[in-house]
Amino acid sequence: MKFDDYRISPKIKAELKKLGFNKPTDIQFKAIQPILNGEDVLAIAQTGTGKTAAFVIPILEQLDSKLRKKKVEGISCLVLVPTRELAIQILDVFKTIGKDLNVVCSSIHGGVEQDPQIKQLNKGVDILVATPGRMFDLVSQGHLDMKKLEFLVLDEADHMLDLGFIKDIQDLLKHIPKKRQTLFFSATITKKIKTLAYSLVQNAIRIQISPNNPVAKNIDHAVAFIEMDDKRFFLENVLKEYPESKFVVFVRTKIRAERVMAAMKRVEVSTEFLHGGVEQKERFEILDRFRKGENKVLVTTDVAARGIDIPDVDYVINYDLPDVPENYVHRVGRTGRGNKRGQALAFCSEEEKLFLTEIEEYTGEDIEHYDIPKGEYFDIIADSEDASHNWKKLIREDNDFNGTEEEW
Ligand code: AMP
């Protein structure tokens, strides 16, 4: 099945073509037609599967044909997301795919002044992408008219629960019509998520991208057993072996990230660090440099990277294994985007083996175990450019020095 085979506006098809989207991904194949048919959807799919376009395409299609016939006062579609980055990203997808349509899209989120957002709302918005905090500020000030809402989308619902937005989401129901189409997306499924989902959707079509296996299919997973103190040499080795590739390196804490960056700096590999404390403007700049390939190695933590769409990541390195197996799913979802293949490589130390077992049980994923032969292991350490460990280089320099002395 190709996008050309769908009964959707040629204007949408043209934009999809420009984006290089020819055929739907798994989630798109399963979700687009039911959404066009007016069904509620409950989907377990993580970032990287193409889930954004899976709801953006059918919503744009339906609203465009309706709004062409009759303009509606107030918001027709509300997309709730946990973070401002995700809000901006999703708005961008709506605007890109809906470029030539009759639909006005906007976003509201914290971290910026609210006045320009209110002005935009007053001008009229059909599709609004919002974070719960800012949305409720504006609802309580009477700036949001959702009486005619037709679509409610919750994206990364699990993350919204983690951030404590459950009450906000429940309160929202007081402000929107009962009769609506609800699309619920979550990367992981827990009892809490199920309860929330079933309080929102009605007779929903359930989609799970691969049952018992929440990890996207087009990713190769491998784990190498490396002692904690040796990991930096192996990271250096991989980064230098693939200088043209883009890497996202996950570490457990900010301090670990700083150490990794310092170690890479010593061996002249440039990296950038994305963490929760980075100012909004700087975050965009860091992500932009990474997107453009000006920086190829992004070091980050689980919290800072969640939900961010970073296209064309070739490798996800789990420099530290996550202690929560769900985070493995979120991390590796950064690669193997859309229909591309991605690589996920984990460095597992002796003390992390338990985490590895938990991850394998949770994902049901075959992670290839790579026991590095002893000789190769020590060669990689010996080959490091890190002055204090580069035995070969030190010996070479020593020989050169002696050699030069003799020539004198
Ligand atoms: P998402 O899971 O929505 O964050 O999308 C992940 C990535 O896949 C994004 O960078 C999209 O541009 C890309 N993508 C989405 N749908 C398709 C498709 N049908 N073909 C190729 N790439 C896609």
Image: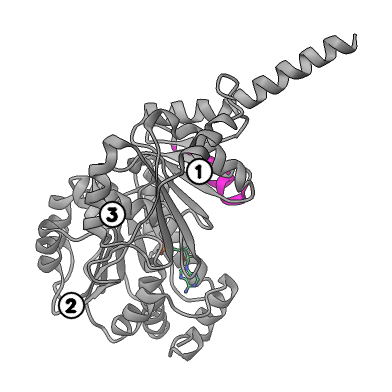
Separation of disc 3 and disc 2 at Cα? 31 Å
Sooner in the amino-acid sequence: mark 2 or mark 1: 2
Question: Where 46 sits versus 350, above or below?
Answer: below
Tell me what residue is drawn at x 37 percent, y 65 percent.
216
Label 2 sits on residue: 204
Outermost residue toward the right in this view:
408
- What label sits on residue 284 in the rendered view? 1
Front residue of 40/131: it is 40
Q: How crowded is mark 3: few (under 14 residues within 10 Å), some or many (20 or more)?
A: some
Look at the magenta stretch and give its main secondary structure: helix
CA gap, disc 3 and disc 1: 28 Å
Three-letter amino acid code at disc 1? Phe
Task: Give the magenta part as a residue range.
Answer: 280-293
Quadrant including the C terminus:
top right
Taking the spot 33% from the left edge, 42% from the top edge, the residue there is 321
Residue 94 placement (x, y as % from top left):
44, 67
- Can residue 75 be seen at all in this image of the molecule? no
Name the residue rendered at 55%, 23% in the picture: 389
Q: Is residue 125 or residue 347 the one in the foreground?
A: 347
Q: Is residue 109 above or below residue 13?
A: above
Nearest the eye: 303 or 145: 303
Provide the secondary structure element on which disc 1 rests. helix
Marks counted in the figure total: 3
Q: Name the residue under label 3.
A: 143
